[in-house]
C-alpha cells in the first residue's frame, strides 16, 4: 500500500485524511467537505473511527458487515461532535474504506471520494459519486449539461456526519494477481480524467512514486483542492 495526501496549490490547509494498515489489509480515505466548518476535523475523526472499529473487530466476522458498522459509527461520531461544538457545527466528510482479505476486496463508501480497480491495463470505477450531477445522469445529457459547470454539480447528496443516519454503499471484488486498487479524493479526479490516471498507473510498476506522480500531475493542472491517493497492490 502507498499513500500520499497533499494540500494542493490553492487551499491553506489539508482537509483530507488517509490511513493505511498493510498488515490488516485496511485503507481509508476521507475528504472533509470544502466550505464547511472543520472539514479537517470531520475527515480525521471519520478515519480514526473507521480504523478503530475495524482493528477491534474479531477475526472471522463478515467483512461487509464490519465496514457497514465502521462507517455507521463514523457517521455517528462526526454528527455528534458537530453538535457538541458550535465551531464544528455542520462539518461533514466523504469516506471510502477498503478491507482486503485473501482473494476479496471489500469496499464501502459515502460521498464522492472514489475507488477504482486497475486490471489488465483497464481502469474501472467501482464506486458511484453521491453528488447531484451523478444523481441526474439517468435523465440524459441535456440535464447534465445544465449543471455540470455549476456549483450544484459538486454538491453532495450523501456525506458522513451531516445527518444522524446515512446510507452506505458497499461492494465486493474478487481480486486477481496483479490487480491494483486506487482510492482518491476528488482533488485528483477533478483535475485528471480516467485515461490520464490510467496512463500514469501503467507507466511503470506501482510504487510510492506512482502515487506521488498522480498528485504532481493534478497540481500541475492547478491543484485547486486537496489531493489524496491510496494505491493497494493485491
Image: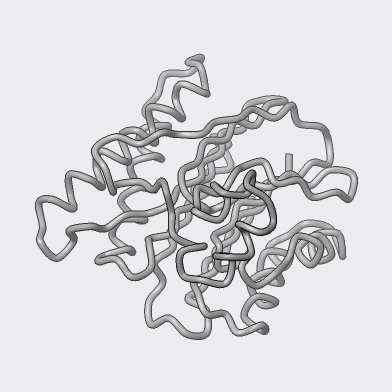
Q: Is residue 161 left or right of residue 50?
A: left
Q: Residue at x 70, y 69 (%)?
A: 192
The one nearer the camera, 117 or 142, is 142
Q: Residue at x 37, y 54 (%)?
A: 93
Quarter of the rendering containing residue 4: bottom right
The one nearer the camera, 112 or 28, is 112
Q: Is residue 155 left or right of residue 216?
A: left
Q: Name the spot of residue 130 as percent of width and height, x first.
A: 50, 47
The one nearer the camera, 20 or 130, is 130
Quadrant containing the C terminus is: top right
Q: Is residue 58 above or below residue 31?
A: above
Q: Is residue 33 left or right of residue 202?
A: left
Q: Is residue 21 above or below residue 217?
A: above
Q: Is residue 223 left or right of residue 231?
A: left
Q: Name the spot of residue 66 as percent of width and height, x first.
A: 44, 25
Q: Residue at x 74, y 26 (%)?
A: 174
Q: Name the spot of residue 98 as percent of width and height, x first.
A: 56, 38
Q: How many marks?
A: 0
Looking at the image, the residue that sits furthest to the front is: 142
Q: Name the spot of residue 54 as percent of width and height, x first.
A: 42, 32
Quarter of the rendering containing residue 179: top right
Amino acid at each position: 500500500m502507498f499513500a500520499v495526501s497533499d494540500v494542493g496549490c490553492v487551499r491553506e490547509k489539508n482537509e483530507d485524511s488517509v490511513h493505511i494498515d498493510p498488515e490488516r489489509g485496511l485503507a481509508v480515505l476521507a475528504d472533509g467537505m470544502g466550505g464547511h466548518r472543520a472539514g479537517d476535523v470531520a475527515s480525521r475523526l471519520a478515519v480514526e473511527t473507521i480504523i478503530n472499529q475495524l482493528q477491534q473487530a474479531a477475526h472471522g466476522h463478515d467483512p461487509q458487515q464490519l465496514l457497514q458498522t465502521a462507517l455507521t459509527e463514523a457517521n455517528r461520531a462526526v454528527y455528534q461532535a458537530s453538535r457538541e461544538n458550535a465551531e464544528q457545527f455542520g462539518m461533514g466528510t466523504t469516506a471510502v474504506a477498503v478491507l482486503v482479505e485473501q482473494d476479496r476486496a471489500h469496499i464501502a463508501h459515502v460521498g464522492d471520494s472514489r475507488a477504482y480497480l486497475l486490471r489488465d491495463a483497464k481502469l474501472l470505477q467501482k464506486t458511484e459519486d453521491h453528488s447531484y450531477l451523478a444523481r441526474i445522469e439517468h435523465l440524459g445529457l441535456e440535464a447534465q449539461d445544465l449543471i455540470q459547470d455549476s456549483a450544484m454539480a459538486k454538491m453532495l447528496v450523501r456525506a458522513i456526519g451531516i445527518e444522524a443516519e446515512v446510507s452506505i454503499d458497499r461492494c465486493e471484488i474478487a481480486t486477481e494477481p496483479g490487480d491494483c486498487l486506487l482510492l482518491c479524493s476528488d482533488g485528483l479526479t477533478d483535475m485528471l480524467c480516467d485515461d490520464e490516471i490510467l496512463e500514469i498507473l501503467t507507466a511503470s510498476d506501482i510504487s510510492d512514486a506512482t502515487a506521488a506522480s498522480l498528485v504532481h500531475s493534478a497540481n500541475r493542472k492547478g491543484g485547486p483542492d486537496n489531493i489524496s491517493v491510496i494505491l493497494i497492490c493485491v
